[in-house]
Amino acid sequence: MVGLNIFRLIGDLFTFILQPFKWLRLEVAKQDAGWWTSNAVNWVFVFILILLLGYWMSQSLSFRKNGTEDKA
C-alpha cells in the first residue's frame, strides 16, 4: 500500500509541475502562434545554457591562470 501511494504522489507531483506546459500547448493550439512563440521555452533553455557555458569557461580560464588546473 505504501509503495502504491508513493507512485501516486510522484504522478501527482509531475502533473502539478508540468501544468504550465499543458496550458501553453492548449493556448498555442487555440491561436495561430508563430514559430518563435511555439518554441519560447526552448529559447529560454538555450539562453540559460549559453550563460552557464560562459560561466564554466571563465572559471576554467581562472583555474588555468592560477596554475591549479590538474594536468593529467
Image (cartoon, rainbow, N blue to C red):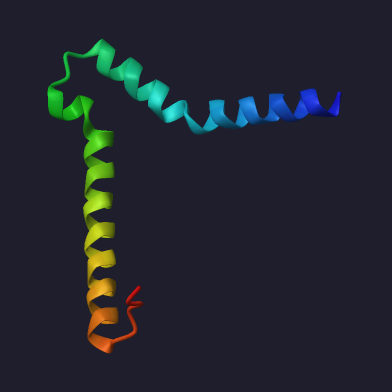
21 is higher (above) or lower (below) than 66: above
Location of the N terminus by quadrant is: top right
Give residue 6's quadrant in the image. Answer: top right
- Residue 60 lies left or right of residue 34; in this view the side is right
Q: Tell me how many marks there are.
A: 0
Give residue 55's quadrant in the image. Answer: bottom left
Q: In the image, what residue occupies the spot 25% across and 58% down? A: 53
26 is higher (above) or lower (below) than 51: above
Q: In the image, what residue occupies the spot 23% across and 34% down? A: 40
Closer to the camera in the image, 55 or 66 = 66
- Residue 12 lies left or right of residue 70; in this view the side is right
Closer to the camera in the image, 63 or 17 = 63
Give residue 41's quadrant in the image. Answer: top left
Location of the C terminus by quadrant is: bottom left
Where residue 26 appears, as percent x and y from the top left, is 34, 15
Q: In the image, what residue occupies the spot 69% across and 29% down? A: 9
Q: In the image, what residue occupies the spot 41% across and 29% down? A: 20
Q: Hey, which residue is sitting farthest front in the picture?
A: 72
Closer to the camera in the image, 69 or 53 = 69
Q: Hey, which residue is sitting farthest bottom in the picture?
A: 66
Where residue 7 appears, as percent x and y from the top left, is 70, 26
50 is higher (above) or lower (below) than 44: below
Where residue 19 appears, as percent x and y from the top left, is 47, 27
